[in-house]
Amino acid sequence: MEKQHNLSKNQKIIFDLIDKSHEPLKAYSILFNVQKKGINAPLQVYRALDKLVEIGKIHKIESRNAFIACQNSSCQISKATAFSICESCEKVSEISNTKLSKYLSNFTDEAGMKYSKYNLEFFGLCKKCKSKE
Amino acid sequence: MEKQHNLSKNQKIIFDLIDKSHEPLKAYSILFNVQKKGINAPLQVYRALDKLVEIGKIHKIESRNAFIACQNSSCQISKATAFSICESCEKVSEISNTKLSKYLSNFTDEAGMKYSKYNLEFFGLCKKCKSKE
DNA sequence: TAACACTATGTAATAATATAACATTTACAA
DNA sequence: TTGTAAATGTTATATTATTACATAGTGTTA
Ligand SMILES: [Zn+2]
Ligand SMILES: [Zn+2]
Ligand SMILES: [Zn+2]
Ligand SMILES: [Zn+2]
């Protein structure tokens, strides 16, 4: 049984916006979009984003400073994330590949260090962009 | 035979600083440190950083907005990078593990997409910080 | 040499991303 | 109902990164 996180008002507004979007959203673009709903300041956005990331409802695409909704229902805590990023159209997809996540979650370095978390970003051309070349 | 990149004046100053550092450096901390050498503006730093990243002499730690020298002589182009990051002391090391890099370089997703580049960041506690717990 | 292309530099202004500090309110369990 | 943690509201500010434009150096080739 997964822990149920009841989103607060601001968290819900911001999550809904990200979830409906088909592309990663940046914090200030989120801010702009929710101003009609009474969210006026960057900090209100960042606080909601922090919480949503913490509980795994969204992920931050570090190389883009942007946020997407988790596309992988089982990934309630964002400790093991992998994404594919098209360098042409900037389409981002979350990769959910059991073998990959097992491989990385069990990865141990030379010094015997085991990691509690990872983030992997793959870059290339998506199908669409590849066919246009 | 690897292509020899003769660094320009600014590139050399900034690379030397990063290379001597035992921790990732942020752009504005670099700027502060090279002002005595005649580099006065953010853009001069960012231009040198961009070039150094492009030729693989340094890497950007995306989750930290910071830069470290490549610790892996064979990685002249930064298309396949992996790092371990201590969440307590912020120590960062570049991982050079042939199996891992082969696994990731050959990774193909469900849709058959192959990637030309990846960046992986592992998080956890380094040896030192673990023993202090 | 002269013409050209390319890379790098210098400088000012500004855009984009993110956090600090403080006051108040809400949710909810002991 | 009282204590505590979480969330909110607001202002100001810090940090990270780029645009725009002018100039200078480097190397190649006609
Ligand atoms: Zn996810
Ligand atoms: Zn694409
Ligand atoms: Zn490297
Ligand atoms: Zn540590």
Image (cartoon, coloured by chain):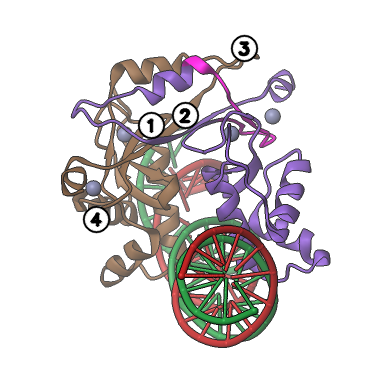
Chain colours: A brown, B purple, C green, D red
Q: Nearer the viewer, residue A12 or A79?
A: A79
- The residue at label 1 has a CB less than 8 Å from ligand 1: yes
Q: Name the amino acid, label 4.
A: Leu
Q: Position of residue B100 (x, y in %)?
A: 47, 19
Per the model, the C-alpha gap separating discs 3 and 1 is 22 Å
Name the residue tied to disc 1: A81
Give the chain of mark 2.
A
Residue in the image at 31% along x and 71% along y: A35
Give me the C-alpha separation between circle 1 and circle 4.
Answer: 21 Å
Classify mark 1: residues with Cα within 10 Å, few (<14), some (14-19) or many (20+). many
Looking at the image, residue A124 lies above or below residue B106? below
| Tag nearer the camera, 1 or 4 | 1
- What residue is at 53 percent from the left and 48 percent from the top? B54
For the C terminus of chain B, the quadrant is top right
Q: Is residue A51 visible?
A: yes
Reading the image, the residue beneath label 3 is A112
Pointer 2: what residue? A118
